[in-house]
Image: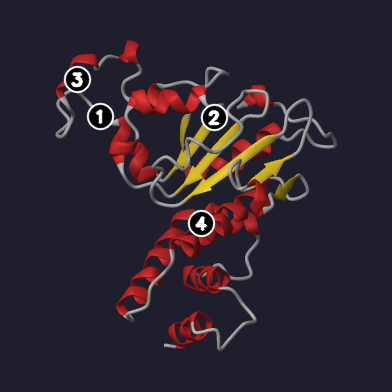
């Protein structure tokens, strides 16, 4: 398989003209069928791209190769970048690696900048400790998260306290969280006792500081970003978030 041979060469450093993450991303887009399409068209088919991404990863594992977690993270950043190219092509910057404790991208604007922190499949502690920790420089989370246990309502409320105004996740995870009831298998007795809309259950009911949903679906990310970027102006209307 040409892709696997290329990846092996890059990993062995016999090929140095492309990074592992860019090679994997390019193969993902090729398999999705949207090579050469506009960023908007590509992101309109985000789940086709994610399906292709899964297939590429499966081929890597089947070939006996390893995909480093840093490579996985860089590929996810490139996927997020598709949405930014579609919705704010002249408004965002990639943050230097010395700023990776804050996030990966920044949309500059007045009165506040907006930071975007990208993670892959697990949020763990890395997402919640990113960003600035204050509403004066809010942060948006973006990831391919797949573990419902990381998104209890109590945990989600902590993101709000850390200055997050939205977190984007695949619709499969969002729908699973949205459907949680006191009878959902695996809920602890403590969560069952606390389960009520007044306490923020399910987690998808929790609002950001603008009284809009904190948890959102990946497919809404580009539209939400475009909505706050006022055309012909440096203004970011974060109240629309």
Horizontal side of residue 118 vs 202, given as left or right: right
Disc 4 on helix, strand or loop? helix
Sequence-first disc among 2 and 1: 2
Q: What separation in Å lies between label 2 and label 4 (alpha carbons)?
A: 19 Å
Element class at badge 3: helix
C-beta proximity under 8 Å, tags 3 and 2: no
Residue 213 visible here: no
Residue with the mark numbered 1: 180
| Number of residue marks | 4
Up the image or down, 61 lies above or below 93; here it is: below
The residue at the point 61 percent across, 55 percent down is 82
Element carrying mark 2: strand
| Contact check, label 1 and label 4, Cβ < 8 Å | no
Q: Secondary structure at mark 1?
A: loop
Near-viewer residue (127 or 78): 127
Please name the residue that numbered disc 4 is placed on: 76
Q: Earlier in the sequence, mark 1 or mark 4?
A: 4
The residue tagged 3 is 190
**Coordinates of residue 128 in the picture (x, y in percent):** 47, 35
Left or right: 58 with respect to 240? left
Q: Which residue lies under the disc numbered 2?
A: 164
Tag 2 near tag 4, CB within 8 Å: no
């Amino acid at each position: 398989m040409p892709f696997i041979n290329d990846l092996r060469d890059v990993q062995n450093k016999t090929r140095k003209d492309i990074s592992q993450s860019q090679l994997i991303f390019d193969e993902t887009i090729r398999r999705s069928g949207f090579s050469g399409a506009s960023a908007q068209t590509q992101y309109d088919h985000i789940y086709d791209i994610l399906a292709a991404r899964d297939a590429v990863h499966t081929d890597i594992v089947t070939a006996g190769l390893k995909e480093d977690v840093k490579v996985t993270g860089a590929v996810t950043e490139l996927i997020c970048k598709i949405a930014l190219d579609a919705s704010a092509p002249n408004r965002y910057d990639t943050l230097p690696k010395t700023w990776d404790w804050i996030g990966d991208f920044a949309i500059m604007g007045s009165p506040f900048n907006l930071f975007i922190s990208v993670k892959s499949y697990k949020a763990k502690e890395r997402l919640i400790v990113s960003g600035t920790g204050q509403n004066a420089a809010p942060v948006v989370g973006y990831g391919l998260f797949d573990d419902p246990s990381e998104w209890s309502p109590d945990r989600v409320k902590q993101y709000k306290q850390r200055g997050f105004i939205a977190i984007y996740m695949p619709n499969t995870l969002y729908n699973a969280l949205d459907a949680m009831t006191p009878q959902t298998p695996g809920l602890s007795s403590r969560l069952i006792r606390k389960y009520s809309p007044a306490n923020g259950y399910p987690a998808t009911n929790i609002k950001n500081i603008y009284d809009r949903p904190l948890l959102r679906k990946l497919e809404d990310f580009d539209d939400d970003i475009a909505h706050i970027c006022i055309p012909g102006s440096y203004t970011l209307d974060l109240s629309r978030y």
